[in-house]
Image (cartoon, grey):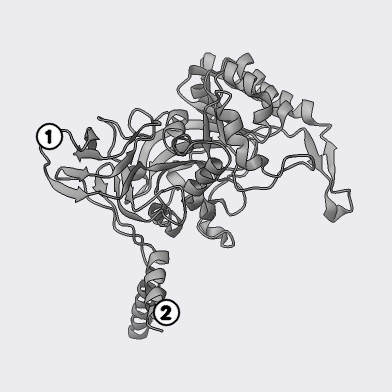
Amino acid sequence: MKNLKKIFLFVMLLCSSIVIAQQTPAPKQTKTITIEGATAHLGNGKVIENSLIMFDSGKITFVGSALTKIARIGEIIDGKGKHIYPGFIIPNSTLGLVEIDAVKATDDDAEMGTWNPHIRSLIAYNTESKVIESMRPNGVLLGQITPRGGRISGTSSIVQFDAWNWEDANIKTNDGIHMNWPNNFTRGRWWLGEDPGLKINKKYANQVSEVANYFKASKAYNKGSESITNLPFEALQGVFDGSKTLYINVNDEKGITDAINFSKENGITKMVIVGGRDAYKITNLLKQNNVPVLLQRVHSRPNNDDDDYDLPYKKAKLLVDNGVLVALQASGQMERMNSRNLPFYAGTTVAHGLTKEQALQLITLNPAKILGIDTNYGSLETGKSATLFISEGDALDMRTNIIIEAFIDGRKISLDTHQTKLWKRYSNKFKNQ
């Protein structure tokens, strides 16, 4: 028995030496903070060159010029030569649901089955994720945690990236249902000797009918006596009464058109196109129906042989110029690691036509509007949450986005990560050589 105790203690000590938890979440703001002299990028298209920003108890109390005659109180931060931005928001993300793709025990982004509107991503969200920790030094402070898989993947929620647990992280619970629209085209299964090229999906019409029938059944259930509980059908009630948004993952022109018509036929007033590869072809339809787009990753290759080589880079401008509400997201291969590049995706759109303030809106106020959290987040305005950061330079440029202070709801958060520790360690090593 003594030997077993010794072995147990040895194992526990070994584990404690290997496992390194995330940085301790910051405590609540207890004193006023004043930032003076920085260039403030408000997130709503406006810029204040010599700004004065004050916040207390997690809320912004003053936004204006540093020339304003008002008492500077609390902790005063000299922002001269620096830039202030609202915290960046990453929508349609699986951050906190998967840690290491190759380790199945850390992968919880999808459930088995086809129809899972009742599956909630929030309760699977892991605040101890080392990947999430690495978002903050680039200014990505909020995210929409979204499930994957099936025809209807489940229900997303919105969180902030400095918390003890998912209850503390939660900003907006069950904001929307996520659905994968049927594809108009399929690829042959090369491993079975089939032609891997694109082919028309002959089952498309039937698959769309299945979706329509499922929504009709759900609507009938929610209008009935509900004597037998059906959790998936109950979860869909929110998209019918407008309390939830329907996020439809679809890329091709016909699919986007069909998805919009489907939503109109079912009386769904809040829907968003996710991906939207061909959305730039039907901007009038999107604008007429007030349908926003969470645009596919900017740093990607053209999909068709006859596409412009820079089409993925300039799609945001094509949509914005035509009055479509657009935000950027990072789904796809290595999406969690690539999420930290969100500000640089926005920077790429600047190189292809948008102004810097328009590009900033793609990752601040626009996603806040689409996710329904713009009353508190997405821009630097009096009364909103003090979720912001100070950068030494242009936050949309990877060469100058060096963040020195960051706050979530007024709480001064840690910017240390495993990567920053390694950077400090090896920069000192090579500095002395």
Q: Secondary structure at mark 1?
A: loop
Q: Is residue 7 left or right of residue 181?
A: left
| Quadrant of the drawing holding the N terminus | bottom left
Residue 144 on image: x %, y %: 46, 40
10 Å crowding of disc 2: few (<14), some (14-19), many (20+): few
The residue that mark 1 highlights is 70
Answer above or below: position of 136 versus 54.
below
The one of 361 and 105 positioned closer to us in this rendering: 361
Distance CA(mark 2)–CA(mark 1): 47 Å
Q: Can residue 245 be seen?
A: yes
Mark positioned earlier in the residue sequence (2 or 1)? 1
Q: Can residue 147 be seen?
A: no
Disc 2 residue type (three-letter): Phe
Number of numbered markers? 2
The mark found on residue 430 in the picture is 2
The one of 33 and 155 positioned closer to us in this rendering: 33
Residue sitting at 73 percent across and 23 percent down?
Answer: 209
| Quadrant of the drawing holding the C terminus | bottom left
Residue 427 on image: x %, y %: 40, 74
Residue sitting at 50 percent across and 57 percent down?
Answer: 99
Disc 1 residue type (three-letter): Ile
Residue sitting at 29 percent across and 47 percent down?
Answer: 407
Residue 183 on image: x %, y %: 74, 34
Q: Secondary structure at mark 2?
A: helix
10 Å crowding of disc 1: few (<14), some (14-19), many (20+): few
The one of 427 and 190 positioned closer to us in this rendering: 427
